[in-house]
Image: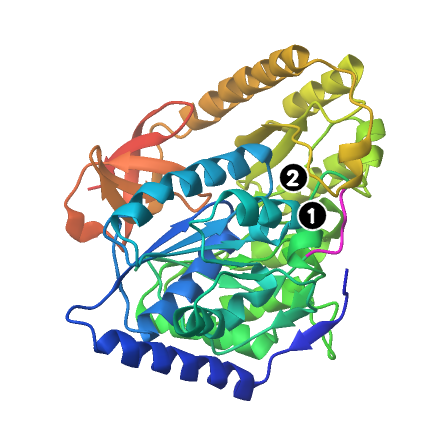
Amino acid sequence: MNRQTTIITPQEVERQREFCQKIHERNAARPTPPLAFVDTYGCQQNEADSERLRGYLREMGYEFTDSEAQADLILINTCAIREHAEMRVLGNVGALVHTKRAKPGQLICVCGCMAQEPHRAQKIKESYRQVDLVFGPHALWRFPELLHRLVTRRGRIFDITDEPGSIAEGIPVARQDRVKAWVSIMYGCNNFCTYCIVPYVRGRERSRRPEVILEEIRGLAEEGYKDITLLGQNVNSYGKDLEEPMDFADLLKAAAEIPGDFLLRFMTSHPKDASQKLFDTMASSPKIAPCFHLPFQAGSDRVLKAMNRVYDRSGYLDKVRRLREAIPDVVITSDVIVGFPGERAEDFEQTMTLLDEVRFDALFTFIYSPRVGTPAAKMEDPVSKEEKAAWFQRLVERQDQISEEKHAAYIGRTVRCLVDGADDKGLTARTPGNRLVRLTGDESLIGQFVNVKITGANKWSLTGEPAE
């Protein structure tokens, strides 16, 4: 793996905008604007990447559609975190053979983390002949150049070389939401947890300059965005690679000082870097949402060591204690992996006891999925799938019970919530702690902070009505 970080110059980014213009000229000659369909899998970082890809496509003269059959260009931004996600992508890519047969000029592009895995890229090359362009996260900033080469020279293109991790500023952004916004503050990861493919497909940690990040947040606040999430594979380690180091707590404090009525969130955090300074910074500003996603992954020290998580159970519990002392009403969510290679029944029981001790507001639970190229994929794994599934079910049922109890405590309270959308069940909103609230009211409330009286709850969400 190449560990060098490259700063893409403004001139290089401008060159990509020139390719956008060339494609725009080609598209302008068509009788109607071409349509692009962008399909995103996985994490919020992928969502943020897709916003930049859409920004490029918009500059190229594309309009957008939700129909694969109507699209002149299909762009699939993939996830590699679990096998299930990859199988879904491959299944959907396979089905596109029918849309391309009906529309022979259709261009199909696959990008993102899965595309960066050599064995997956080879699989696409050999078995999915309908795919025209494949590129990984390192090449995202060069998408216009790759697409221009595709449309002018023909022939399939695969660009998944192990390039240095890069930072490119000035890429256009086409945001899908008018209430919530993602802001990437850093890319890559240095942790190398033994089960995780992220450092191999996204590269080493590299931080954007604080002044650029703060200017982006300032612009979003001025545009009226109300919920701004700072993104990184490990936001807590932000700034360690900058010439003039600035830690994440200082960046968060500076962001909270920007004028405007908005909430700041962030994800994801690694427990080893979650500091008292960060907890105190969160407590100091009403603009910083009182919620913290703090993955623990396993309750057993033996399993945590095998995962290379670089903390132990007692250290994790101490962080949770200090976080709650600083912010008594904080909402804590987490990730846990069930059935890691070599995990025993007694190890899993320690995960269950940690669950009862912390009482998370919500939990994202996964059965271990081997990732080719990671150390854990080579570890002995004697526990049967059936036993892992039984463990998983116990974990989910216990967390559902805790979540329902936590949510029931909201009933009768009035909470300031951000109304962020609507669906067939009515308006949706979020508490400062990011709990989903379903409420009555007119759609004119979308994008506003509203005091909501909580009238009901279940394990998944709250219900309420605007307070008098």
Looking at the rendered structure, the kind of residue marked 1 is: His
Residue at 60% of width from left, 29% of height from top? 366
First along the sequence among labels 2 and 1: 1
Residue 208, above or below 84? below
Residue 359, above or below 263? above
Q: Position of residue 216 (x, y in %)?
A: 46, 73
Looking at the rendered structure, the kind of residue marked 2 is: Pro
Residue 234 lies left or right of residue 302; in this view the side is left
Residue at 25% of width from left, 54% of height from top? 65
Mark 2 lies on a secondary structure that is: loop
Quadrant position of the C terminus in the picture: top left
What residue is pinned by disc 2?
A: 295
Assign the magenta stretch its main secondary structure: loop
Q: Nearer the viewer, residue 80 or 257?
A: 80
Dividing the picture into quarters, in which one does residue 123 lie?
A: top right
Residue at 52% of width from left, 71% of height from top? 141
Would you say the residues marked 2 and 1 are in contact, meaning their CB atoms lie under 8 Å apart?
A: yes
Asked if the stretch drawn in magenta spans residue 320, the answer is: no
Q: Nearer the viewer, residue 209 or 125?
A: 125
Quadrant position of the N terminus in the picture: bottom right
Q: State which region is magenta.
A: 189-193
What residue is pinned by disc 1?
A: 270
